[in-house]
Image (tube, rainbow, N blue to C red):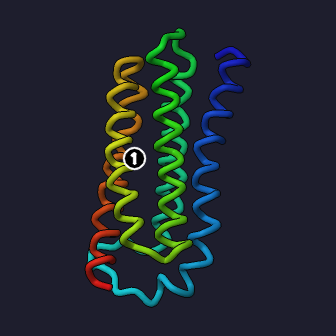
């Protein structure tokens, strides 16, 4: 791997991880206050699962972005990167809405939009790099599960 590609890979991973860092500012402060008081569904994983899961998913997202970024230029590549950043923004926004604003309904609306944009990202990434698209499948599954949890928390509370 060329040094320039390695730097692109690190940058793509760090950019993706940044969404998690932004979201964690809103999440950490709400967990011990508001979130702990909520009725939660029985399928909710233990709290320690979320950090390693998200770190792994953001890393996979960064690698996926890198594979598209290093591909040869095209209008599809530009659109793919724009859509990727839209879903990354929606990802961070969910933590602000759900935890920061303590609003499961707004979080739920956001997460359904996020799921659609993740699917769109996978479709356009697939046209550029099949590997990049496949790397986003665990993210789609996890966000789908998070949508279930968000919905259940909204209904239960």
Q: Could you tell me which residue is drawn at 57 percent across and 17 percent down?
A: 70
Q: Residue furthest bottom?
A: 37
Q: Which residue is mark 1?
A: 139
Looking at the rendered image, the quarter that the C terminus falls into is: bottom left
x and y percentages locating residue 91 in the rendered image: 48, 52
Q: What is the count of numbered marks?
A: 1
x and y percentages locating residue 103 in the rendered image: 44, 74
Judged from the image, the secondary structure of the residue bearing numbered disc 1 is helix
Q: Is residue 140 left or right of residue 9?
A: left
- Frontmost residue, 144 versus 138: 144
**Above-or-below relation of 127 to 143:** above
Q: Is residue 107 left or right of residue 81?
A: left
Looking at the rendered image, the quarter that the N terminus falls into is: top right
Residue 147 occupies quadrant: bottom left
x and y percentages locating residue 68 in the rendered image: 50, 22
**Above-or-below relation of 14 to 23:** above
x and y percentages locating residue 98 in the rendered image: 46, 70
Q: Could you tell me which residue is drawn at 49 percent across and 11 percent down?
A: 74
Is the residue marked by circle 1 packed among few (<14), some (14-19), or many (20+) residues within 10 Å? Answer: many
Q: Could you tell me which residue is drawn at 35 percent across and 64 percent down?
A: 108
Residue 110 occupies quadrant: bottom left
**Above-or-below relation of 112 to 64:** below
Q: Is residue 154 left or right of residue 13?
A: left
Q: Could you tell me which residue is drawn at 51 percent across and 23 percent down?
A: 67
- Frontmost residue, 47 versus 147: 147
């Amino acid at each position: 791997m060329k040094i320039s590609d390695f730097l692109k890979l690190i940058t793509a991973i760090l950019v993706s991880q940044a969404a998690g860092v932004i979201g964690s500012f809103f999440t950490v402060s709400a967990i011990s206050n508001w979130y702990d008081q909520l009725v939660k569904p029985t399928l909710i994983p233990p709290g320690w699962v979320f950090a390693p899961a998200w770190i792994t998913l953001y890393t996979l997202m960064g690698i996926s972005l890198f594979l598209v970024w290093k591909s040869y230029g095209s209008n599809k590549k530009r659109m793919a990167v724009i859509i990727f950043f839209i879903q990354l923004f929606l990802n961070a926004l969910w933590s602000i809405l759900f935890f920061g604003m303590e609003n499961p309904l707004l979080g739920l609306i956001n997460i359904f939009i996020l799921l659609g944009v993740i699917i769109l990202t996978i479709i356009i990434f697939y046209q550029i790099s099949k590997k990049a698209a496949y790397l986003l499948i665990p993210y789609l599954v996890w966000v789908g599960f998070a949508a279930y949890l968000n919905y259940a928390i909204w209904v239960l509370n």
